[in-house]
Structures are given as C-alpha cells and as structure tokens.
Image (cartoon, rainbow, N blue to C red):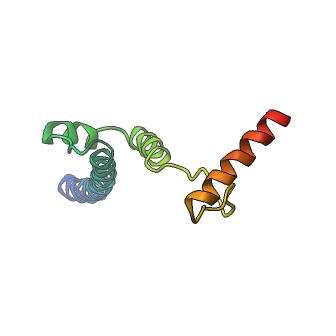
Amino acid sequence: MNLEQIADVLEKAATYVEAIESTKADAVAHDRQKLASILNERYEEATGESLDDEALHKLAGADLDVLAAFDKLAESHSSVSDLGGPSDRHDRSASLTVKEASDKADEDFLNFIVS
C-alpha cells in the first residue's frame, strides 16, 4: 500500500463519517424546530400573540432537554381541569304564581324564625 491509497481510504472514511454526523445534526435540528413550533403554538393559544422570528430561532437553537421541559410545562398549563358538572338537583322549585311565591316566602321566613 502506498501513501496515496492510504490517503484515499482516510478521505473516504472522513467523508462517510461526515455524512453520518450531518444526518444526525439535521435530525436534531428538525426535532428542535418541531418542538419550538409546538411551543410557539401553545404560547399563541395562551397569549393570543405569536413569538417573533428571532425568539423562535433562539428557542429552536436550545438544547432538546430544555425544549422538552418547556413543552411539559406548557402542556400542563394549557388546559383548565374540570371542577365538576352542573347540579342535577334544585333547592327550590320554581313558583308558578305570585301567590305561590308569597306563600313560599312566608313559609321560609317562619321556618327561619322558629329555627
């Protein structure tokens, strides 16, 4: 083996490794951009405003762990939890006439005084 062949093999190996690393870097950049876009949507839902391009670019350049933490935080605060449903029972039935309403008011007042 002469030096030219060794140089060719090293050059091909470097090109191969560079292509693999480039593919990995592109995949990470795509994941970051996707997470930043999701965070931007959630920010827009919460505030009614979208992040400007500079802020979005900075967010996309952040570490994946940081973006995942922000995503988890935004997801946990994106919706309000239900506190229950409407009541099925009514405390009082609706009075149909003025006389019934007056009688009910008198009855409630007397019950209040007696108790």
Residue in the foreground of this view, choosing between 86 and 42: 86
Q: Quadrant of the C terminus?
A: top right
Against 73, residue 18 (above or below) is below
Return the x and y of residue 95 as percentages of the image width and height.
Answer: 60, 61
Return the x and y of residue 104 as percentages of the image width and height.
Answer: 68, 52
Q: Could you tell me which residue is drawn at 72 percent across and 40 percent down?
A: 109
Residue in the foreground of this view, choosing between 115 and 16: 115
Tag count in the figure? 0
Q: Could you tell me which residue is drawn at 79 percent across and 33 percent down?
A: 113
Against 13, residue 57 (above or below) is above
Q: In the displayed structure, does residue 101 sit left or right of residue 48?
A: right
Q: Could you tell me which residue is drawn at 48 percent across and 45 percent down?
A: 72
Q: Quadrant of the N terminus?
A: bottom left
Q: In the displayed structure, does residue 77 sit left or right of residue 37?
A: right
Residue furthest left in the image: 53
Q: Could you tell me which residue is drawn at 49 percent across and 48 percent down?
A: 80
Return the x and y of residue 49 as percentages of the image width and height.
Answer: 21, 43
Q: In the displayed structure, does residue 11 sit left or right of residue 104?
A: left
Q: Is residue 115 visible?
A: no
Residue 26 falls in image quadrant: bottom left
Against 68, residue 22 (above or below) is below
Q: Is residue 82 visible?
A: yes
Q: In the displayed structure, does residue 57 sit left or right of residue 42?
A: left
Residue furthest right in the image: 115
Return the x and y of residue 63 as percentages of the image width and height.
Answer: 36, 39
